[in-house]
Image (spheres, helix red, strand yellow):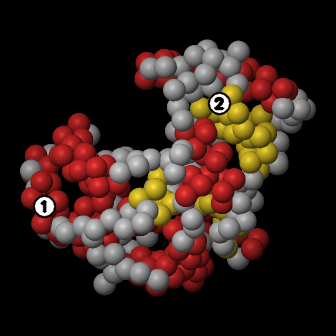
Amino acid sequence: MLPRVDSDDEWDAIVPDEAVMRPGAAALCSRLGLRASPLVRFPTGSQPVYAVGDRYVLKLFPAAADDGVAEARVLAHLQGRLPVPTPYVHDAGAYENGWRYVLMSRLRGTDLAVAWPRIPPADRDRIATEAGETLAALHALDVSPLTDVLGPGDWDAFVGRQRASAAGRQRAHGLPDAWREQIPGFLDAVPLPAHGPGALLHTEFMRQHLTVDAADDWRLTGLLDFEPAMIGCRAYDFVAVGLFVSRGDPRLLSRVFRAYGETFGPGELLAHTLLHVYSNLPWYLRELPAPPEPTLESLAQTWFGTG
């Protein structure tokens, strides 16, 4: 039986502990008729996720988390509508002590982030094109069936809250004052377009959430992890693209934009980076190319420029 998780402290104590989590996941698999399938926990991810044999993936969500409902609904809405596969929902619902679960199909292929060093340059270019086409298809979908489960509701109000807290959130992550003090002025100077009809956003469109198959010439074979999906401004989805797909490579980002059919400026994308729910500028500064000058304007060109 899985114990209830309502706080960060309970999460830290319970969720990483396989002596607690694994029996609960195994009992749920038995209830779902998958008793004989091997159960292997994936080492990464914000939620506990298990491979159940070769065909299924079981994702668990603790009490007070609406993410399980949202992910199941989004995946059902997406089925067969994108250029790349998304997991098929076999079952979803409440478990015990507030936990929810989604039992989904396992995507074919390998984590793109793991495979990337082995992928030839020409295939990387094609992957960038496929990524742009996938985002274009995602953003073109009707979002009305999902407005009851996806936030933030009022996008402009969300942006206002994120803008007001941007510098403080980066201070909490340890951003040096020389960078942090630039944030309010930078956000004031970057005009964000008026928000039009909201698009379905993945919000974490990154190599870690894409799969590829070496046997199929490294083509994209899947897009996963719609737990943090939102409805909002399309440019917001290109934060993760620039940081975690092209990773400061202007040629790759340019290919994504060409396939997508629209370009967003470097300043706009860095502004959305600072507004993003999961923004962590100190981490990005460690992981991505350094700008030639210690300014946010230079940073925007380095990470989101297209040459």
Mark before the other along the chain sequence, 2 or 1:
2
**CB under 8 Å between callouts 2 and 1?**
no
Residue placed at 34% from the left, 75% from the top?
264
Residue placed at 10% from the left, 46% from the top?
177
Q: Would you say 82 lies left or right of 103 here?
A: left
Q: Amino acid at mark 2?
A: Arg
Q: Would you say 97 lies left or right of 31 here?
A: left
Q: Residues within 10 Å of mark 1 (few under 14, many from 20)?
A: few
Q: Would you say 133 lies left or right of 163 here?
A: right
Q: Position of residue 59 (x, y in %)?
A: 66, 38
Visible residue check, residue 286: no
Image quarter where the N terminus lies is top right
Q: Would you say 276 lies left or right of 119 here?
A: left
Question: What's the mark number on residue 188?
Answer: 1
Image quarter where the C terminus lies is bottom left
Residue placed at 68% from the left, 20% from the top?
96
Figure label count: 2
Residue placed most toward the observer, 170 or 116: 170
Visible residue check, residue 141: yes
Residue placed most toward the observer, 271 or 94: 94
Q: Residues within 10 Å of mark 2 (few under 14, many from 20)?
A: many
Residue placed at 55% from the left, 24% from the top?
63
Q: Amino acid at mark 1?
A: Asp
Residue 9, quarter of the rendered image: top left
Residue 269, placed above or below residue 19:
below
Question: What's the mark number on residue 100?
Answer: 2
Q: Secondary structure at mark 2?
A: strand
Residue 194, quarter of the rendered image: bottom left
